[in-house]
Image (cartoon, rainbow, N blue to C red):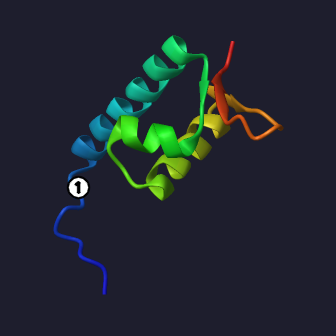
Amino acid sequence: MANTQFLIKDKTQQKLRIAEKRSLILEWLKTEGHSNSEILSQVIGLKRQGADNALKAMLRDGLVRSEELGTGYKLET
């Protein structure tokens, strides 16, 4: 059974955390040019699956793009 004691239950706090993660990722990509979910998981302080989920949502929202050759994600320009 999963430990849920650290989950954010308040919707406002959830939205703030999502915005914080996105901001950290976007700032990193502006500085580095590209990255992957393994590196970005360390940047945002989550496991790789959490970073993957954040990146998929950002890809869906047009904030980043994925590159075919396995280099990871880039800032959408």
Residue 7 falls in which quadrant of the image? bottom left
Residue 14 placement (x, y as % from top left): 29, 46
Judging depth in this view, the residue of 5 and 15 nearest the camera is 5
Residue 76 placement (x, y as % from top left): 67, 19
Farthest-out residue, right: 68
The N terminus sits in image quarter: bottom left
Residue 24 left/right relative to 10: right
Q: Is residue 2 above or below residue 19?
A: below
Residue 72 left/right relative to 46: right
Residue 59 placement (x, y as % from top left): 65, 36
Judging depth in this view, the residue of 1 and 14 nearest the camera is 1
Residue 15 falls in which quadrant of the image? top left
Secondary element at tag 1: loop
Q: Residue at 38%, 26% (x, y): give it.
A: 24
The C terminus sits in image quarter: top right
Q: Amino acid at mark 1?
A: Ile
Q: Residue at 49%, 58% (x, y): give it.
A: 49
